[in-house]
Structure formats: structure tokens, C-alpha cells
Amino acid sequence: MSLPKYAVRRLLLGLAQIVAVTTLVFALTEALPGDAAVVLAGDVPDPARIDRIRQELGLDRLAPVRYADWLLGLLRGDLGSSLTAGRPVTGFLADAGGPTVQLAAITLLLLVPLAVAVGVVAAIREGRLLDRALTSVGIGLYSVPEFALAVVLVALFALRLGWFPPTAVGVGPDLLAQPAVLVLPLLVLLARPICSISRLVRAGMIDALRSDYVRHAHRLGLSTRRVRLAHALPNAVAPAVQQLARTTDWLLSGVITVEAVFVVPGLGTALVSAVSARDIPVIQGLALVFAATTVAVNLVADVVAFRLAPRAGGAA
């Protein structure tokens, strides 16, 4: 199979996955008790008022009809309007997307050099105290859930020591305006990916340093630094490329957890609020964004893997 055909095949599969995800999210949201009309009616809802709100919001129509209308609107680029705020979902997502994109982008920018550096240092010091310490810390951090790590960091560095703000309440959508707010969320987002990617880099670096071509480079009189950086490192980083793609995908769920704990006004916080309010158009829009991002990241990773190993990719 040629690369263009494989890419088109994966793209069509990805589109089908997006439709399946949005359908499942819609069905699960419909199964939740109550709806947006109950939320808008207040703490002491009047049944007549609830029915009137349902009619105004169109919630009295059958669920399949409402979902079909949403799909038709999606083809026109219209994601509908929020049931509780009355705003277009596209504008809602654009406002909430800024902090999420900032968190994810900064995490990736820091992740690659830090993970590679830790892996290389551990490989160079293989079996020594530093290597064992980095391995132990990595295993420990990787076993801690993001939510638990976030709570510990807030309790220690925010509440006890007072070094960083515990939440992003009142900061606004531009997190870069107050960098201190980013420190604890970034630590949580970086902890597990650094551990997993650095372990792959370490293993690849050890294999590369023991290879024949590295020994030959030493015999040619090349410096140790040049051999490590120019010859061993590129081969050591290669196995971590696919893991980096999976990490980018994982960041979606990680950002949602982090935003919920640190009250960051991003897509994760918007999702929690939308679920609480049964705001189905917003939930569907967020599900579409998350599903499309996941499909795009995996599509790029699969195409790159197919290009580098076309036989394995074509067989799959």
C-alpha cells in the first residue's frame, strides 16, 4: 500500500472514530439525570417552568432528532449555542482553549529536552548511584496519579511554603501574564511523561553506546562528547518518538485533571462545568475537539511510522 492511500485510509478511520465518540458522549449525557432546564430552573424548580424552558431550548424534541440537527450544523461549521450561557459554542471553545493550549505547548517544549537529558545522563552513569537514583525517582513519580500529585504539590509548595499560588482563580485566560501560576500545573503534567520517555532514551542510549559503530568512532579518534551527541544520541532518541506522540495524546486527559485541580480557566474546567449544567452542545463541542486532536496526533504518528517502516505499516 502506498503512503497516500494509507494516509487516506487512516483519515477516514479517524473521522469514523470522531463520529463514534461524539455519539457515545451524546448518549451518555442523555443518560444523566436531569438536564439543562432543571439546572436553569433553580434550586426550587417549578415543573411548569421546567417544561417551558425545555421548549425554549428545544429539549422537548427526541434525542435522535437533536443529535441529527447537531451533525447537520457541524457540516456547516456550526456547533450550536450553549444552553446555559446562550453563547455560540465556537466562541466558548476559543476562549477556553487559550489556557489549555498554553499549558500543553509549554509542557511539550520542556518535556523533550528534559526527558532526553535525564535519559542520556542515566545511560552515561549506568549502574552508578545517579542512575539508580533517577530510576527510583522515575518509578515513584510514574506510579503517582496526576490528581494525587497535584494535591501534594499544592499542600506543600502553595499552602505550607507559600512559594506558588494554589490555583489560577482570578488570573484570566492569559496564564503567561503570571508565570508563577504555571509552575505547579507544569510539574504535574511533566512528571509522568519525563519518566516514561527518559527510560526509553536511557535504554536506547545504552544500546547505542555498546554498538559497533560507536566503538569504531572511538577507534577513529573522535572525542567522547562527539560520539555521544552525534552518533549515539540520534539512535537513542528514535524509539522515543512514538512515545512522544502517545504523550501528546495523553496530555488531553492530563490537562483536564490539572485544570480541574488548579481551577485553570481552560477546556478541562469548561468540560466539568458543562457536565454539571448538562450543557449538551458544549459537551459535544469539547468531545469533538478532544477526539479530533487525538485522531490528528495518532494519524501523524502512524503516517511517520509507515514512512519509516512501510512493510510493517502496510501489514498493519
Image: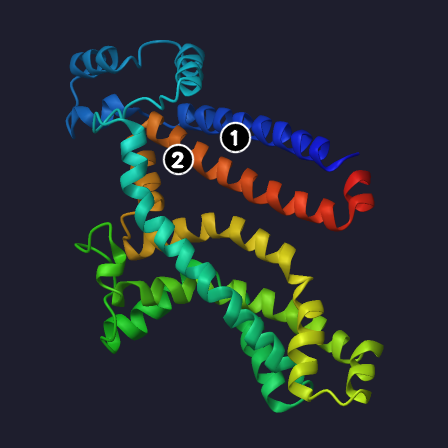
Element at label 2: helix
Q: Nearer the viewer, residue 115 or 268?
A: 115
Q: Is residue 157 above or below residue 250?
A: below
Q: Quadrant of the C terminus?
A: top right
Q: Is residue 52 above or below residue 173?
A: above
Query: What residue is at 16 percent from the left and 30 percent from the top?
Result: 43
Which tag, 2 or 1, sits closer to the chain's start? 1
Q: Is residue 248 above or below residue 303?
A: below
Q: Nearer the viewer, residue 189 or 37?
A: 189
**Distance CA(mark 2)–CA(mark 1):** 11 Å
Q: Position of residue 125 (x, y in %)?
A: 65, 87
**Are there few (<14), some (14-19), or many (20+) residues within 10 Å of tag 1?**
some
How many marks the image carries: the answer is 2
Q: Position of residue 296 (x, y in %)?
A: 55, 40
Residue 68's disc number: none
Residue 286's disc number: 2
Query: What residue is at 36 percent from the left and 49 percent from the top?
Result: 100
Answer with left or right where residue 85 lies relative to residue 123: left
Query: What residue is at 30 percent from the left and 57 percent from the top?
Result: 262
Q: Check disc 1 and report the residue beneath it.
A: 21
Q: Is residue 134 above or below residue 77?
A: below
Name the image colouring.
rainbow
